[in-house]
Image (cartoon, grey):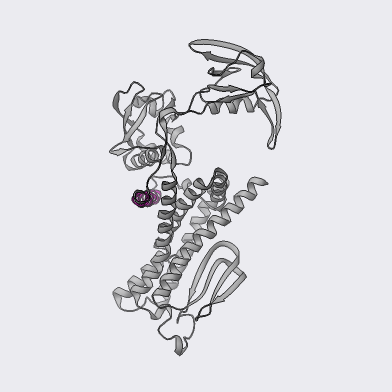
Amino acid sequence: MGDLLTNLLAFIVAISVLVAVHEYGHYIVGRWAGMKVLRFSIGFGKPLLTWVRGNDRTEYCLSAIPLGGYVRFLDGREGPVSPEDAGRAFDQRPIVARIAVLLAGPAFNFLFAILAYWVIFTSGVPTLLPAVGDVAPGSYAARAGLKSGDRILAVGDAATADWETALVAMLDRIISDGDVPLTLQSDAGVQRSATIVVGSDAARLTEPGMLFEGLGFVPWQPPAVIAAIAPGGAASAVDLIAGDRVVSVDGSAIRTADDLIREVSARPGEAVVLKYYRGDELRTVDITIRAEPEEQGVIGRIGVTVSHDYGDLAYLRKYGPLDSVRESIGKTWSTMTFTVRMLGRMVTGDVSIKNISGPIKIAQYAGDSAERGGREFLTFLALVSISLGILNLLPVPVLDGGQIVFQTVELLKGSPMSERSQIIGQQFGIVALILLMSFAFYNDLMG
Protein backbone atom coordinates (compact mmCIF):
# COMPACT_ATOMS: atom_id res chain seq x y z
CA MET A 1 0.00 0.00 0.00
CA GLY A 2 2.90 2.33 0.81
CA ASP A 3 4.48 1.88 -2.63
CA LEU A 4 1.11 2.36 -4.34
CA LEU A 5 0.47 5.58 -2.41
CA THR A 6 3.99 6.86 -3.13
CA ASN A 7 3.60 6.10 -6.84
CA LEU A 8 0.21 7.81 -6.98
CA LEU A 9 1.32 10.94 -5.12
CA ALA A 10 4.55 11.23 -7.14
CA PHE A 11 2.59 10.76 -10.37
CA ILE A 12 0.06 13.46 -9.44
CA VAL A 13 2.84 15.88 -8.47
CA ALA A 14 4.77 15.18 -11.69
CA ILE A 15 1.77 15.54 -13.99
CA SER A 16 0.50 18.64 -12.19
CA VAL A 17 3.89 20.38 -12.37
CA LEU A 18 4.51 19.53 -16.04
CA VAL A 19 0.97 20.36 -17.14
CA ALA A 20 1.17 23.67 -15.26
CA VAL A 21 4.42 24.48 -17.08
CA HIS A 22 2.96 23.49 -20.46
CA GLU A 23 -0.29 25.42 -20.02
CA TYR A 24 1.49 28.43 -18.57
CA GLY A 25 3.41 28.64 -21.85
CA HIS A 26 0.14 28.87 -23.79
CA TYR A 27 -1.29 31.28 -21.22
CA ILE A 28 1.54 33.79 -20.96
CA VAL A 29 2.27 33.95 -24.70
CA GLY A 30 -1.46 34.30 -25.36
CA ARG A 31 -1.56 37.22 -22.94
CA TRP A 32 1.47 38.79 -24.63
CA ALA A 33 -0.23 38.34 -28.00
CA GLY A 34 -3.29 40.28 -26.81
CA MET A 35 -5.68 37.35 -26.39
CA LYS A 36 -8.30 37.21 -23.64
CA VAL A 37 -7.91 34.21 -21.33
CA LEU A 38 -11.18 32.91 -19.89
CA ARG A 39 -9.85 30.01 -17.82
CA PHE A 40 -6.53 28.45 -16.76
CA SER A 41 -7.18 24.98 -15.32
CA ILE A 42 -4.84 22.40 -13.82
CA GLY A 43 -6.80 19.16 -14.14
CA PHE A 44 -10.00 18.31 -15.97
CA GLY A 45 -13.59 17.99 -14.87
CA LYS A 46 -15.34 19.84 -12.07
CA PRO A 47 -13.31 22.73 -10.59
CA LEU A 48 -12.48 22.10 -6.91
CA LEU A 49 -10.92 25.52 -6.27
CA THR A 50 -11.42 28.64 -8.36
CA TRP A 51 -9.87 32.12 -8.18
CA VAL A 52 -10.97 35.01 -10.39
CA ARG A 53 -8.26 37.58 -11.06
CA GLY A 54 -7.40 40.51 -13.33
CA ASN A 55 -9.29 42.93 -15.52
CA ASP A 56 -10.36 40.07 -17.78
CA ARG A 57 -11.82 38.16 -14.79
CA THR A 58 -9.80 35.08 -15.71
CA GLU A 59 -10.72 31.91 -13.79
CA TYR A 60 -7.79 29.99 -12.30
CA CYS A 61 -8.88 26.46 -11.36
CA LEU A 62 -7.72 23.27 -9.71
CA SER A 63 -10.01 20.59 -11.13
CA ALA A 64 -11.01 17.12 -10.01
CA ILE A 65 -9.10 14.92 -12.49
CA PRO A 66 -5.33 15.62 -12.16
CA LEU A 67 -4.36 14.11 -15.52
CA GLY A 68 -3.96 17.21 -17.64
CA GLY A 69 -5.09 20.79 -17.92
CA TYR A 70 -6.06 23.47 -20.37
CA VAL A 71 -6.15 27.18 -21.17
CA ARG A 72 -9.41 28.45 -22.60
CA PHE A 73 -9.11 31.56 -24.75
CA LEU A 74 -11.96 33.71 -25.96
CA ASP A 75 -12.78 32.28 -29.42
CA GLY A 76 -15.27 33.53 -31.99
CA ARG A 77 -15.80 29.98 -33.24
CA GLU A 78 -17.42 29.08 -29.94
CA GLY A 79 -19.87 31.99 -29.75
CA PRO A 80 -20.29 35.72 -30.35
CA VAL A 81 -17.56 38.10 -29.18
CA SER A 82 -18.72 41.24 -27.37
CA PRO A 83 -17.79 44.60 -28.94
CA GLU A 84 -15.45 45.49 -26.07
CA ASP A 85 -13.47 42.26 -26.70
CA ALA A 86 -13.35 42.64 -30.47
CA GLY A 87 -9.94 41.61 -31.81
CA ARG A 88 -8.97 39.76 -28.61
CA ALA A 89 -10.40 36.35 -29.51
CA PHE A 90 -7.95 33.58 -30.47
CA ASP A 91 -9.33 33.31 -34.01
CA GLN A 92 -9.21 37.09 -34.46
CA ARG A 93 -5.50 37.45 -33.73
CA PRO A 94 -2.84 37.17 -36.49
CA ILE A 95 -2.07 33.60 -37.54
CA VAL A 96 1.59 33.98 -36.56
CA ALA A 97 0.46 34.91 -33.04
CA ARG A 98 -1.79 31.83 -32.87
CA ILE A 99 1.06 29.57 -33.96
CA ALA A 100 3.32 31.18 -31.35
CA VAL A 101 0.74 30.43 -28.64
CA LEU A 102 0.47 26.79 -29.78
CA LEU A 103 4.24 26.38 -29.86
CA ALA A 104 4.65 27.97 -26.43
CA GLY A 105 3.34 24.95 -24.48
CA PRO A 106 5.93 22.48 -25.81
CA ALA A 107 8.60 25.20 -25.72
CA PHE A 108 8.02 25.75 -22.00
CA ASN A 109 8.34 22.00 -21.43
CA PHE A 110 11.76 22.11 -23.08
CA LEU A 111 12.71 25.21 -21.05
CA PHE A 112 11.67 23.39 -17.87
CA ALA A 113 13.97 20.49 -18.81
CA ILE A 114 16.86 22.91 -19.37
CA LEU A 115 16.25 24.50 -15.95
CA ALA A 116 15.98 21.08 -14.27
CA TYR A 117 19.24 19.89 -15.82
CA TRP A 118 20.89 23.18 -14.85
CA VAL A 119 19.98 22.55 -11.19
CA ILE A 120 21.25 18.98 -11.47
CA PHE A 121 24.56 19.91 -13.11
CA THR A 122 25.30 22.74 -10.66
CA SER A 123 24.58 20.52 -7.64
CA GLY A 124 26.73 17.67 -8.97
CA VAL A 125 25.88 14.35 -10.60
CA PRO A 126 27.30 11.07 -9.23
CA THR A 127 28.62 9.41 -12.38
CA LEU A 128 29.91 5.97 -13.32
CA LEU A 129 32.35 5.45 -16.16
CA PRO A 130 31.07 2.66 -18.44
CA ALA A 131 32.90 -0.61 -17.82
CA VAL A 132 32.03 -4.18 -18.79
CA GLY A 133 31.09 -6.75 -16.13
CA ASP A 134 30.36 -10.43 -16.76
CA VAL A 135 30.12 -11.47 -20.41
CA ALA A 136 27.82 -14.37 -21.31
CA PRO A 137 29.49 -17.10 -23.39
CA GLY A 138 28.29 -17.24 -27.00
CA SER A 139 26.58 -13.84 -26.77
CA TYR A 140 26.92 -10.90 -29.17
CA ALA A 141 29.33 -9.29 -26.70
CA ALA A 142 31.43 -12.47 -26.39
CA ARG A 143 31.66 -12.85 -30.17
CA ALA A 144 32.82 -9.23 -30.39
CA GLY A 145 35.60 -9.99 -27.89
CA LEU A 146 34.43 -7.96 -24.89
CA LYS A 147 36.10 -8.89 -21.60
CA SER A 148 35.10 -8.26 -18.00
CA GLY A 149 36.81 -5.07 -16.82
CA ASP A 150 36.98 -3.41 -20.26
CA ARG A 151 36.30 0.34 -20.17
CA ILE A 152 34.07 1.65 -22.96
CA LEU A 153 35.85 4.81 -24.12
CA ALA A 154 33.67 5.52 -27.15
CA VAL A 155 30.75 4.20 -29.18
CA GLY A 156 31.54 5.05 -32.79
CA ASP A 157 32.69 8.67 -32.75
CA ALA A 158 30.84 9.49 -29.51
CA ALA A 159 33.04 9.65 -26.41
CA THR A 160 31.35 7.98 -23.43
CA ALA A 161 31.95 9.83 -20.17
CA ASP A 162 29.16 7.94 -18.36
CA TRP A 163 26.81 4.98 -18.73
CA GLU A 164 23.89 7.11 -19.91
CA THR A 165 25.89 8.49 -22.83
CA ALA A 166 27.13 5.00 -23.67
CA LEU A 167 23.64 3.46 -23.61
CA VAL A 168 22.10 6.17 -25.79
CA ALA A 169 24.94 5.87 -28.31
CA MET A 170 24.67 2.06 -28.35
CA LEU A 171 20.91 2.16 -28.90
CA ASP A 172 21.38 4.77 -31.62
CA ARG A 173 23.84 2.54 -33.48
CA ILE A 174 21.69 -0.57 -33.00
CA ILE A 175 18.61 1.03 -34.56
CA SER A 176 20.67 2.74 -37.29
CA ASP A 177 22.54 -0.20 -38.82
CA GLY A 178 22.75 -3.06 -36.31
CA ASP A 179 26.49 -2.58 -35.69
CA VAL A 180 27.92 -1.11 -32.48
CA PRO A 181 31.59 -0.08 -32.93
CA LEU A 182 33.36 0.31 -29.60
CA THR A 183 36.68 1.70 -28.43
CA LEU A 184 37.72 -0.32 -25.38
CA GLN A 185 40.49 -0.13 -22.81
CA SER A 186 41.53 -3.22 -20.87
CA ASP A 187 42.47 -3.38 -17.18
CA ALA A 188 46.10 -3.14 -18.31
CA GLY A 189 45.41 0.12 -20.14
CA VAL A 190 45.63 -1.32 -23.67
CA GLN A 191 43.17 0.20 -26.14
CA ARG A 192 41.50 -1.78 -28.91
CA SER A 193 38.48 -1.68 -31.20
CA ALA A 194 35.56 -4.10 -31.21
CA THR A 195 32.23 -4.22 -33.03
CA ILE A 196 29.07 -5.82 -31.67
CA VAL A 197 26.98 -7.02 -34.63
CA VAL A 198 23.29 -7.61 -33.92
CA GLY A 199 21.94 -7.38 -37.48
CA SER A 200 18.16 -7.82 -37.72
CA ASP A 201 17.80 -8.42 -33.97
CA ALA A 202 17.64 -4.68 -33.27
CA ALA A 203 13.90 -4.45 -32.52
CA ARG A 204 14.11 -7.13 -29.80
CA LEU A 205 17.10 -5.46 -28.18
CA THR A 206 15.22 -2.16 -27.93
CA GLU A 207 12.51 -3.69 -25.74
CA PRO A 208 12.58 -2.24 -22.20
CA GLY A 209 15.23 -3.94 -20.07
CA MET A 210 16.50 -6.12 -22.93
CA LEU A 211 19.66 -4.30 -24.01
CA PHE A 212 22.22 -5.86 -21.65
CA GLU A 213 20.53 -9.25 -21.60
CA GLY A 214 20.30 -9.27 -25.38
CA LEU A 215 23.89 -8.13 -25.96
CA GLY A 216 25.15 -10.59 -23.34
CA PHE A 217 26.99 -8.47 -20.79
CA VAL A 218 26.26 -6.44 -17.68
CA PRO A 219 27.82 -3.25 -16.32
CA TRP A 220 30.77 -3.78 -14.02
CA GLN A 221 29.92 -3.82 -10.31
CA PRO A 222 32.13 -4.12 -7.22
CA PRO A 223 32.86 -7.72 -6.15
CA ALA A 224 31.40 -9.03 -2.88
CA VAL A 225 34.23 -7.87 -0.61
CA ILE A 226 33.43 -7.70 3.10
CA ALA A 227 34.03 -4.21 4.44
CA ALA A 228 33.08 -4.80 8.09
CA ILE A 229 31.79 -7.50 10.44
CA ALA A 230 28.88 -6.60 12.76
CA PRO A 231 29.42 -7.61 16.42
CA GLY A 232 27.13 -10.45 17.46
CA GLY A 233 26.16 -11.33 13.88
CA ALA A 234 26.44 -14.74 12.24
CA ALA A 235 29.68 -13.79 10.47
CA SER A 236 31.37 -12.77 13.73
CA ALA A 237 31.10 -16.36 14.98
CA VAL A 238 32.98 -17.87 12.01
CA ASP A 239 36.27 -17.29 10.22
CA LEU A 240 35.35 -14.20 8.20
CA ILE A 241 37.20 -10.87 8.29
CA ALA A 242 37.12 -7.56 6.45
CA GLY A 243 38.74 -7.92 3.03
CA ASP A 244 37.43 -11.45 2.32
CA ARG A 245 35.80 -11.77 -1.13
CA VAL A 246 32.76 -14.07 -1.23
CA VAL A 247 32.40 -16.09 -4.44
CA SER A 248 29.54 -18.52 -3.71
CA VAL A 249 26.69 -19.25 -1.30
CA ASP A 250 25.69 -22.93 -1.25
CA GLY A 251 26.90 -23.35 -4.82
CA SER A 252 25.25 -20.19 -6.18
CA ALA A 253 27.90 -18.01 -7.81
CA ILE A 254 28.45 -14.61 -6.21
CA ARG A 255 30.10 -12.07 -8.49
CA THR A 256 29.02 -8.75 -7.02
CA ALA A 257 28.08 -7.17 -3.72
CA ASP A 258 24.45 -7.05 -4.86
CA ASP A 259 24.56 -10.79 -5.65
CA LEU A 260 25.59 -11.53 -2.05
CA ILE A 261 22.90 -9.30 -0.55
CA ARG A 262 20.21 -10.81 -2.79
CA GLU A 263 21.27 -14.43 -2.13
CA VAL A 264 21.57 -14.08 1.65
CA SER A 265 18.32 -12.08 1.96
CA ALA A 266 16.42 -14.89 0.23
CA ARG A 267 17.66 -17.61 2.66
CA PRO A 268 16.54 -16.65 6.20
CA GLY A 269 17.30 -19.38 8.73
CA GLU A 270 19.24 -21.62 6.34
CA ALA A 271 22.60 -23.26 7.04
CA VAL A 272 24.81 -22.70 3.98
CA VAL A 273 28.35 -23.18 2.76
CA LEU A 274 30.15 -19.93 1.99
CA LYS A 275 33.19 -19.91 -0.30
CA TYR A 276 35.47 -16.89 -0.24
CA TYR A 277 38.96 -15.70 -1.13
CA ARG A 278 41.37 -14.37 1.44
CA GLY A 279 44.10 -12.96 -0.74
CA ASP A 280 44.76 -15.71 -3.30
CA GLU A 281 43.57 -18.55 -1.04
CA LEU A 282 40.12 -20.07 -1.60
CA ARG A 283 38.44 -20.94 1.72
CA THR A 284 35.15 -22.50 2.83
CA VAL A 285 33.04 -21.89 5.94
CA ASP A 286 29.67 -23.17 7.22
CA ILE A 287 27.34 -20.41 8.39
CA THR A 288 23.71 -20.18 9.46
CA ILE A 289 21.91 -17.19 8.00
CA ARG A 290 19.84 -15.44 10.62
CA ALA A 291 16.18 -14.63 10.02
CA GLU A 292 15.33 -11.02 10.82
CA PRO A 293 11.87 -9.43 10.53
CA GLU A 294 11.63 -6.35 8.33
CA GLU A 295 8.74 -4.24 7.08
CA GLN A 296 8.68 -6.24 3.82
CA GLY A 297 8.81 -9.59 5.64
CA VAL A 298 11.48 -11.89 7.10
CA ILE A 299 14.86 -11.64 5.37
CA GLY A 300 18.24 -13.30 5.85
CA ARG A 301 21.32 -11.58 7.26
CA ILE A 302 24.82 -12.73 8.19
CA GLY A 303 25.99 -9.50 9.84
CA VAL A 304 28.43 -8.11 7.28
CA THR A 305 28.76 -4.86 5.38
CA VAL A 306 29.89 -5.29 1.79
CA SER A 307 31.93 -2.75 -0.10
CA HIS A 308 30.33 -0.78 -2.93
CA ASP A 309 33.59 0.89 -3.91
CA TYR A 310 33.73 1.54 -7.66
CA GLY A 311 37.25 2.94 -7.38
CA ASP A 312 38.21 5.34 -10.16
CA LEU A 313 35.11 4.41 -12.17
CA ALA A 314 32.97 6.66 -9.96
CA TYR A 315 33.24 10.44 -9.77
CA LEU A 316 31.12 13.51 -9.09
CA ARG A 317 30.45 15.51 -12.24
CA LYS A 318 29.81 19.13 -11.33
CA TYR A 319 29.77 22.34 -13.37
CA GLY A 320 29.74 26.04 -12.58
CA PRO A 321 26.60 28.12 -13.20
CA LEU A 322 27.62 29.27 -16.70
CA ASP A 323 28.99 25.91 -17.86
CA SER A 324 25.80 24.29 -16.58
CA VAL A 325 23.76 26.42 -18.99
CA ARG A 326 25.69 24.99 -21.93
CA GLU A 327 25.54 21.45 -20.56
CA SER A 328 21.81 21.59 -19.78
CA ILE A 329 20.94 22.93 -23.23
CA GLY A 330 23.08 20.23 -24.83
CA LYS A 331 21.53 17.53 -22.65
CA THR A 332 17.99 18.67 -23.48
CA TRP A 333 18.76 18.83 -27.20
CA SER A 334 20.38 15.39 -27.33
CA THR A 335 17.46 13.86 -25.41
CA MET A 336 14.97 15.53 -27.76
CA THR A 337 16.68 14.33 -30.93
CA PHE A 338 17.13 10.79 -29.58
CA THR A 339 13.44 10.64 -28.58
CA VAL A 340 12.36 11.79 -32.03
CA ARG A 341 14.59 9.17 -33.70
CA MET A 342 13.17 6.46 -31.43
CA LEU A 343 9.60 7.51 -32.28
CA GLY A 344 10.40 7.46 -35.99
CA ARG A 345 11.94 4.00 -35.70
CA MET A 346 8.86 2.75 -33.86
CA VAL A 347 6.75 3.77 -36.84
CA THR A 348 9.04 1.82 -39.20
CA GLY A 349 9.17 -1.19 -36.84
CA ASP A 350 12.90 -0.92 -36.11
CA VAL A 351 12.24 -0.14 -32.43
CA SER A 352 9.86 -2.09 -30.20
CA ILE A 353 6.55 -0.36 -29.42
CA LYS A 354 6.90 -1.83 -25.93
CA ASN A 355 8.83 1.35 -25.15
CA ILE A 356 5.53 3.26 -25.09
CA SER A 357 4.58 3.65 -21.42
CA GLY A 358 1.18 4.51 -20.01
CA PRO A 359 0.12 6.08 -16.71
CA ILE A 360 0.73 2.90 -14.68
CA LYS A 361 4.39 2.60 -15.68
CA ILE A 362 4.93 6.36 -15.48
CA ALA A 363 3.50 6.34 -11.95
CA GLN A 364 5.90 3.51 -11.00
CA TYR A 365 8.85 5.43 -12.44
CA ALA A 366 7.69 8.57 -10.62
CA GLY A 367 7.44 6.76 -7.29
CA ASP A 368 10.80 5.00 -7.70
CA SER A 369 12.60 8.22 -8.60
CA ALA A 370 10.96 10.13 -5.75
CA GLU A 371 12.09 7.48 -3.25
CA ARG A 372 15.68 7.75 -4.53
CA GLY A 373 15.80 11.49 -3.83
CA GLY A 374 15.28 14.95 -5.24
CA ARG A 375 17.96 14.68 -7.93
CA GLU A 376 16.45 11.50 -9.37
CA PHE A 377 12.93 12.90 -9.30
CA LEU A 378 14.06 16.09 -11.01
CA THR A 379 15.79 14.01 -13.70
CA PHE A 380 12.53 12.06 -14.16
CA LEU A 381 10.59 15.33 -14.49
CA ALA A 382 13.04 16.61 -17.12
CA LEU A 383 12.72 13.43 -19.21
CA VAL A 384 8.91 13.38 -19.02
CA SER A 385 8.76 17.11 -19.77
CA ILE A 386 10.77 16.58 -22.95
CA SER A 387 8.53 13.66 -23.94
CA LEU A 388 5.41 15.73 -23.25
CA GLY A 389 6.72 18.56 -25.40
CA ILE A 390 7.54 16.24 -28.31
CA LEU A 391 4.23 14.38 -28.04
CA ASN A 392 2.31 17.65 -28.25
CA LEU A 393 4.20 18.64 -31.41
CA LEU A 394 3.06 15.54 -33.31
CA PRO A 395 0.85 16.55 -36.27
CA VAL A 396 -2.26 15.01 -34.70
CA PRO A 397 -5.26 17.39 -34.88
CA VAL A 398 -6.24 17.20 -31.19
CA LEU A 399 -2.67 18.10 -30.15
CA ASP A 400 -0.77 21.38 -30.46
CA GLY A 401 1.10 20.07 -33.51
CA GLY A 402 -2.13 19.32 -35.36
CA GLN A 403 -3.51 22.76 -34.57
CA ILE A 404 -0.29 24.29 -35.86
CA VAL A 405 -0.85 22.38 -39.12
CA PHE A 406 -4.37 23.86 -39.37
CA GLN A 407 -3.05 27.38 -38.76
CA THR A 408 -0.23 26.92 -41.28
CA VAL A 409 -2.69 25.74 -43.95
CA GLU A 410 -4.82 28.82 -43.27
CA LEU A 411 -1.74 31.04 -43.57
CA LEU A 412 -0.81 29.49 -46.94
CA LYS A 413 -4.26 29.41 -48.52
CA GLY A 414 -5.53 32.67 -47.09
CA SER A 415 -8.62 31.18 -45.45
CA PRO A 416 -9.41 28.63 -42.74
CA MET A 417 -9.76 24.96 -43.59
CA SER A 418 -13.35 23.89 -44.15
CA GLU A 419 -15.31 22.83 -41.12
CA ARG A 420 -15.73 19.34 -42.62
CA SER A 421 -11.96 18.97 -43.08
CA GLN A 422 -11.33 20.03 -39.51
CA ILE A 423 -13.95 17.59 -38.17
CA ILE A 424 -12.40 14.72 -40.16
CA GLY A 425 -8.99 15.73 -38.83
CA GLN A 426 -10.27 15.81 -35.25
CA GLN A 427 -11.80 12.35 -35.66
CA PHE A 428 -8.53 11.01 -37.05
CA GLY A 429 -6.66 12.54 -34.13
CA ILE A 430 -8.99 10.99 -31.55
CA VAL A 431 -8.61 7.55 -33.16
CA ALA A 432 -4.81 7.94 -33.25
CA LEU A 433 -4.67 8.90 -29.57
CA ILE A 434 -6.97 6.00 -28.60
CA LEU A 435 -4.66 3.60 -30.43
CA LEU A 436 -1.60 5.14 -28.77
CA MET A 437 -3.16 4.91 -25.31
CA SER A 438 -4.26 1.33 -26.01
CA PHE A 439 -0.65 0.36 -26.78
CA ALA A 440 0.50 2.17 -23.65
CA PHE A 441 -2.03 0.49 -21.36
CA TYR A 442 -1.30 -2.91 -22.92
CA ASN A 443 2.43 -2.44 -22.30
CA ASP A 444 1.73 -1.34 -18.71
CA LEU A 445 -0.41 -4.39 -17.96
CA MET A 446 1.79 -6.93 -19.74
CA GLY A 447 5.16 -5.51 -18.64
x and y percentages locating residue 22 in the rendered image: 46, 63
Query: Which residue, as the protein is rendered here, is positioned at the far bottom?
Result: 83
Q: Residue at x 67, y 19 (%)?
A: 234
120 left or right of 247?
Answer: left
Tell me if residue 274 can be seen: yes
Residue 288 position in % (x across, y down): 68, 18
Image point (54%, 47%), residue name: 365
Residue 415 appears left or right of 223? left
Q: Is residue 161 magenta?
A: no
Residue 94, image x, y percentages: 35, 78
Total residue callouts: 0
The residue sitting at 44% across, 46% down in the picture is 123
Residue 356 in sight = no
Position of 24 relative to 115 (above/below): below
Depth order, front residue of 283/235: 235
67 relative to 416, above or below: above
Front-most of residues 236 and 157: 236
Please check the rendered image and state whether residue 341 is part of the magenta-colored stretch, yes or no: yes
The span shown in magenta is 324-346
Name the magenta segment's main secondary structure.
helix
Quarter of the figure with the C terminus: top right
Above-or-below relation of 280 to 63: above
Question: Measured from the top left, where is residue 336 in percent x and y?
Answer: 38, 52
